[in-house]
Image (tube, rainbow, N blue to C red):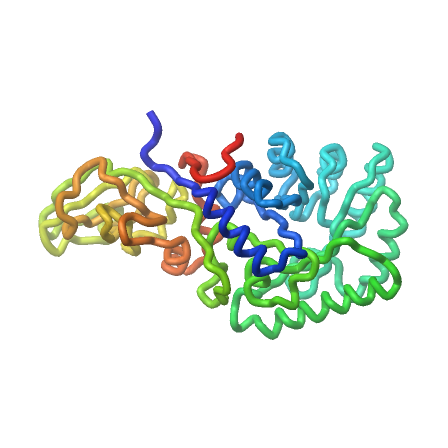
Amino acid sequence: MPRPTIAEIDLSAIAHNLRELRKLAGEKVEMIGIVKADGYGHGAIPVSWTLSAGGVKRFAVATVEEGAMLYDAQLPGSILILGAQGLVEVEAICDFGFEVVVGDLDFAARLDEVARKRRRTVDIHLKFDTGMGRVGFPVEQAMKVVRRIAELPGLSVAGVMTHFASADERAGAEFTREQIRLFTSLHQTTHAINFRIPLWHACNSGGLLQYPEARFDAVRPGIAMYGSYPSPETARPVELREAMTLKTRLAQVREVPEGATVSYGRTWTARRASQIAVLPIGYADGWNRGNSNKGHALVRGRRAPIVGRVCMDMTMLDVTDIPGVCANDEAVLLGAQGKERITVEEVATLLDTIPHVVVTSLTGRIPRMYKGGEQRK
């Protein structure tokens, strides 16, 4: 029997978000499909087919293993490996024909060596660090990097990229503009020496939504593609639709007397005789323990507060004020029920985190069910 706890993915919402973001970026700007972390918890392969149907031709993942899953799905288009790769993964990158981000000359040299041995050419995207402080070539070494890469016949430069550190925050606006200035200067410098590169890209979701001058040739919206804005401070020039609904059914409804406590640590005490509903979902499913005694689920179209500590496999609700609640009633933790809605952003704010964490934390123990779009396996 199927588990009652599921994540329902509306692929038509992702298709809608793609259209809205493309409209914002402009038709001449390439949309790179960011489907790492199993499509931000939504399912990389179904999401990728939906994006492909919408015209996306390049799919970006974090690891070679993620890329291999897309390769096996026979998606049309290019697969770009974004993550910092170790030297041990070079052979797999060459064998699969992946594009790969390069921000280290030792890695570039090893990649070139393996590519030439296999009589192949690997398409690379040079990554420059304009302020993220994580990976990438220093901007001031641009000419040294370009000259060295030009000497490696096994490599072909398909793109140049950077990554914004705080494009989704008001306080980061000045820093982001400085990153854009550095990247624009790099763009002008390479053109001046006739080092032609097909694709320049910098924007994540925050960059795309807030910095039109940074859209260049391509953009890389991640969380926005799945329907969430990256932070409460981010501008909202387009209407996005969250694609995920997380729902389950009440396993049990029980009465507890005034003064009774619920769950580990006895952190919640009934101030009256109460109806407590038990949900078969917990932190082993990725429903964060930080939701303990905070937030809500929707039952019969109304909000029921989460009470007591979230357990490994169970979460409790106080449904006293919702008439007629009984076992097997549907409960929605993310998404809409009736006229009420609980958004990913709401839960992220409650947990003092970002929407990315909420959706990518949901584990494989929760089946993903799909509706409304490309559903190839």
Left or right relative to 96: residue 302: left
Left or right relative to 2: residue 117: right
Q: Residue at x 76, y 36 (%)?
A: 94
Total tally of numbered discs in the picture: 0
Q: Position of residue 113 (x, y in %)?
A: 85, 40
Furthest-top residue in this view: 1
Furthest-right residue in this view: 151
Left or right relative to 321: residue 162: right
Left or right relative to 141: residue 327: left
Quadrant position of the N terminus in the picture: top left
Nearest the eye: 12 or 310: 12
Nearest the eye: 266 or 40: 40
Q: Residue at x 49, y 50 (%)?
A: 16
Q: Residue at x 71, y 49 (%)?
A: 101
Question: Looking at the image, can residue 304 be seen?
Answer: no
Question: Looking at the image, can residue 225 be seen?
Answer: yes
Q: Position of residue 365 (x, y in %)?
A: 41, 35
Q: Position of residue 129 (x, y in %)?
A: 70, 61
Q: Position of residue 286 (x, y in %)?
A: 41, 44
